[in-house]
Image: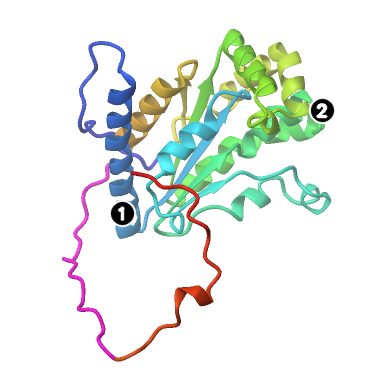
Amino acid sequence: MAVLKKKAKGRSRQAGPLTRKQYEKELRRLQEQMVQLEDWVRYRGQRLVVIFEGRDTAGKGGVIKRMTALLNPRFARVVALPAPTERERTQWYFQRYVAHLPSAGEIVIFDRSWYNRAGVEHVMKFATDAEYDDFMRTCPQFERMLVRAGIVLVKYWLSVSDAEQERRFLARINDPSKRWKLSPMDLQARARWVDYSEAKDQMFAYTDIPEAPWYVVEADNKRAAQLNLISHFLSLIPFEAVPHDDIALPPRQRRNYVRPPKSSQRMVPAKYQVE
């Protein structure tokens, strides 16, 4: 795997739980380092892929939002694909994912990935046994091929307990703003907890390879999981500060021009005032 470990920057191991204010401060520090990482990826022409997998409600979306909060979306893309179309089902399985792989200077984050075949497609019988067996046999080869091509591949599994998943599901049911997150497939995942556990263990047995290992993050505490994951991710990539030209604002253009009055435009009412 084309990743070199380096000494972590910044905060040393904490003595106790962080307060909310300390969490926000540390998150901001890590997000600023993510910007430095993005600059380095662009400067060096690196290609970086990050995969997020885990049970429903594990907090994948929350971590991704915080990782990418300050990044330039032109160079750091999040890929969350819907169910495959009829046409895509006739393609080579990895084909629709390959189309989203990064070019030089790009970071691509998969919110679920080709590992759908080892999880939901296998458990819910959307894939045949032959298709599942073929995936488990060829996935390590596919990932080794990506790494040999110079792509940095990092894989995270967010682990959530049975009790915490139930609490989060109930929160979605009772909160109209979160109810959209709860699909019939999520309910089936809850009902088939043991089947999904077995599928995850089998997936790890086949695809936890030295070139692209799995990293497991305890995610019952969302804020702690976010900090732990982002900090770990930054420790994997040997990025450095890149040179930037000094920036000076040019003088504003001066010439005679009379603009139309604001009364001629459809202005949004100033309903709110904020200090």
Instruction: Give the residue at mark 2.
Output: 125
| Between 67 and 195, the one nearer to me in the picture | 67
Q: Is residue 60 left or right of residue 83?
A: left
Disc 2 to disc 1, C-alpha distance: 43 Å
184 w.r.t. 112: above or below: above
Q: Mark 2 or mark 1, which is nearer to you? A: 1
**In which quadrant of the rendered image does the N terminus lie?**
top left
Q: Which mark is residue 108?
A: none
- Residue 147 picture location, percent across and down: 46, 45
Q: Secondary structure at mark 1?
A: helix
Residue bounds of the magenta highlight? 237-255
Mark positioned earlier in the residue sequence (2 or 1): 1
Residue located 39% across and 49% down the image: 71
Give the residue furthest to the bottom. 256
Query: Which image quarter holds the C terminus?
Result: top left
SS at mark 2?
A: loop
Q: Amino acid at mark 1?
A: Asp
Question: With respect to residue 126, does 225 lie above or below?
Answer: above
The amino acid type, in three-letter code, at marker 2 is Lys
